[in-house]
Image (cartoon, rainbow, N blue to C red):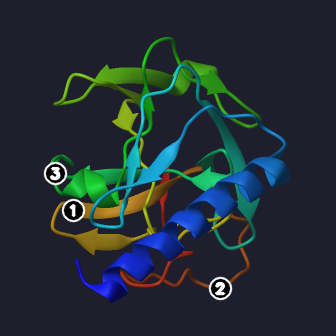
Amino acid sequence: MTRSLARYQAKLRGVVLGSLVTGLGVTGVLVTSQLAVGTAGAQTAHNTKSVVISTSSSAKLGTYLVSGGRTLYILNKKACSGQCLKYWPPVELSSGSASAGVGVSASKLGKVKDAAGKWQVTYAGKPLFWFYHDVAAGQVKGNNVKDTWGVWTIVVTVKPASTGKPPVTTTTSPGTGGVSF
């Protein structure tokens, strides 16, 4: 391992840990979900007993799903497994079910066994993921990202109010698009 990679991983560990503490303090929601830094510097998910799925909102994005203040994503097209899970950690449970927080329809929450046999939280039947570049509450760096596995979008529960202007869409800039449920 090179020195620069080791320094990057150490810095990322501090950012992730600090962001999780800050995110929990900002949202006021206790979520027992934990993230750790894997060997490639990406976050990996750990099974937890309870996860609270709630919402956040912005004028540009509308109301979208979060857990512990961190944005949740779905994958359109292919399945996420192997290397994909290093960059897009699944929202997992070791037992029980996810809880519906503010703005979330409990009837749309569910769980499904993933390829590894672990329970993954779903919303309207779609498996939920975090993005490893979103290290603080409110970040949406994975929105409309197209990669090897498909297109990733936030889960929009209420579309943003119309500004009278047509929406701007892009595949590289977060903040537009998303999938409404």
Q: Which residue is mark 3?
A: 78
Amino acid type of the residue tagged 3 in the rendering: Lys
- Left or right for 160, reference 35: right
Q: Amino acid at mark 2?
A: Lys
Crowding near the residue tagged with mark 2, few <14, some 14–19, many ≥20 C-alpha atoms within 10 Å: few
Q: Which quarter of the picture shows residue 128? A: top left
Whether the residues at callouts 1 and 2 have beta carbons within 8 Å, the answer is: no
* Element type where label 1 sits in the image: strand
Q: Secondary structure at mark 2?
A: loop
User: Does label 2 or label 3 sit earlier along the sequence?
Assistant: 3
Which one is nearer the viewer's eye here, 4 or 104? 4
Which residue: 52% across, 85% down?
Answer: 168
Q: Could you say whether the residue bearing mark 3 is in a helix, strand or loop?
A: loop
The Cα atoms of the two marked residues, 1 and 2, are separated by 28 Å
Image quadrant assignment for residue 9: bottom left
Left/right of residue 160 with respect to residue 89 in the rendered view:
right
Does the rendering let one see residue 137? no
Which residue: 27% across, 66% down?
40
- Indicate the position of residue 101 as horizontal and vertical percent values: 72, 31
* Residue holding disc 1: 150
Question: Label 3 neighbourhood size at 10 Å, few (<14), some (14-19), many (20+)?
Answer: few
Read off the residue under disc 2.
165
Three-letter residue code for mark 1: Gly
Residue 68 in the image: x percent, y percent? 66, 45
Q: From the viewer's perspective, is residue 125 above or below residue 147?
A: above
Whether residue 9 is visible to the viewer of this picture, yes or no, is yes
